[in-house]
């Protein structure tokens, strides 16, 4: 049976509708089969607490790429040790206080051997000494004293006097008195032990009465405005009469102080005397001692503050017997500040 055009359009429209309904039915069938598959897979539910305590975490799958291994690096400082010496031939002085200076040095062995050759090349005939020069008095020859070094020392404390200038030479002293210098130190000056003995010729004195008068202290009954006006007039007159310095000097006149010539000093000497056989050989600090015909001898030394060791050897004429006597002498002088008695005029 033939269809009318209107019916044909209706039939054409129904066919796509059936296809859509057919697709929907396929999707529903696939969903049902997937749900039935999921129902057959057992599902185990665990709480977070059980998983963290009993079940370890699943291992990370190996995908063939490993992260680079980072090694822990720690900074380790290399130990640093001070060298035994720096290859110098130097000696230095440092002031500790008015009565002591500290001396330290560095002398190389080849430098010593080179200068030892000038004295004969024998260590048995020389001693190492510090020769201390006191250069306080300008224009005069410095006073000299020797300190014998012992036990391969590299530093020494030297006894000094307050407000004195010094420098030191380290060298080798031969038994015949010859001396060769290995190094010379810097110059230092020790501080004072008390107040300065220098008194200025002029001191500025203050006329308190004049200051009190300028402030109006003697003019009772004046008001503050009147006092201020009076002060201004007086200062104006002082400035117009001269310079500012002159105005100040007019208020206070310098006072001449007589410079005192009083002085007092004291020194000590050490006398060492002894005796032995007239034909014996005696040395003091490595130096030969001249004996008298009866075998006695006397030695005199200036004794500054400090501790001094005198090494004295006596050897028999046949060289079989030797005796040693070592006096140890110390001196400590106190120098308090000058005392000016009350009621006495300078």
Image (tube, helix red, strand yellow):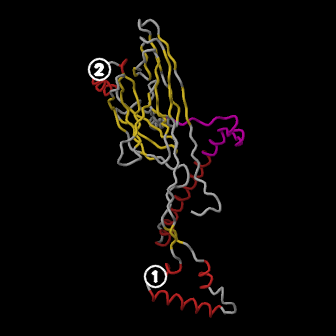
**Residue for point 51% across, 30% down:** 270
Please tell me the numbered disc located at residue 40.
Answer: none
Q: Is the residue marked by circle 1 packed among few (<14), some (14-19), or many (20+) residues within 10 Å?
A: few
Instruction: Report x, y in % for residue 193.
Output: 54, 49
Q: Residue 40: say if magenta.
A: yes
As displayed, is residue 45 above or below residue 315?
below
Q: Residue 55: say if magenta.
A: yes
As displayed, is residue 246 above or below residue 27?
below
Residue under pointer 1: 244
User: Label 2's element?
Assistant: loop
Q: What is the quadrant of the C terminus in the image?
A: bottom right
Q: Which residues are magenta?
A: 34-62
**Residue for point 43% across, 35% down:** 104
**Nearest the eye: 70 or 150:** 150
Q: Quadrant of residue 181?
A: top left
Instruction: Report x, y in % for residue 277.
Output: 46, 11
**Nearest the eye: 169 or 338:** 338
Mark 2 and mark 1 lie on one chain; the one further toward the N terminus is 2
**Residue for point 63% across, 46% down:** 35
As displayed, is residue 213 above or below residue 73?
below
Viewer can see residue 330: yes
Instruction: Report x, y in % for residue 213.
Output: 62, 85
Residue under pointer 2: 120
Viewer can see residue 63: no
């Amino acid at each position: 049976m033939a269809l009318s055009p209107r019916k044909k359009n209706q039939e054409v429209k129904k066919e796509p509708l059936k296809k859509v309904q057919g697709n929907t039915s396929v999707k529903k069938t696939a969903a049902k089969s997937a749900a039935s598959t999921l129902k057959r897979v057992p599902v185990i539910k665990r709480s977070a607490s059980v998983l963290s305590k009993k079940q370890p975490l699943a291992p990370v799958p190996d995908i063939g790429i490993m992260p680079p291994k980072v090694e822990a690096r720690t900074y380790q400082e290399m130990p640093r040790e001070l060298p035994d010496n720096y290859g110098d031939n130097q000696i230095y002085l440092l002031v500790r206080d008015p009565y002591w200076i500290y001396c330290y040095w560095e002398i190389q062995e080849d430098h010593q051997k080179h200068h030892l050759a000038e004295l004969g090349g024998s260590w048995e005939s020389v001693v190492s000494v510090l020769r201390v020069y006191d250069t306080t008095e300008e224009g005069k020859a410095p006073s000299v004293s020797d300190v014998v070094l012992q036990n391969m020392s590299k530093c020494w404390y030297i006894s000094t006097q307050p407000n004195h200038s010094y420098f030191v030479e380290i060298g080798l002293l031969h038994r015949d008195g010859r001396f060769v210098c290995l190094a010379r130190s810097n110059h230092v000056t020790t501080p004072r032990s008390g107040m300065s003995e220098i008194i200025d010729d002029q001191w500025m004195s203050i006329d308190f009465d004049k200051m009190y008068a300028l402030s109006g202290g003697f003019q009772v009954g004046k008001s503050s405005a009147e006092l201020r006006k009076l002060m201004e007039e007086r200062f104006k007159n002082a400035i117009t009469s001269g310079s500012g310095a002159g105005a100040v000097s007019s208020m206070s006149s310098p006072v001449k102080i007589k410079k005192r010539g009083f002085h007092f000093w004291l020194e000590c000497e050490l006398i060492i005397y002894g005796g032995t056989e007239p034909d014996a050989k005696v040395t003091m600090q490595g130096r030969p001692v001249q004996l008298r015909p009866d075998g006695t001898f006397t030695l005199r030394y200036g004794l500054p503050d400090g501790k001094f060791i005198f090494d004295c050897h006596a050897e028999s004429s046949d060289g079989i017997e030797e005796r040693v006597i070592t006096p140890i002498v110390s001196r400590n002088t106190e120098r308090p500040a000058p005392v000016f008695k009350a009621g006495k005029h300078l």
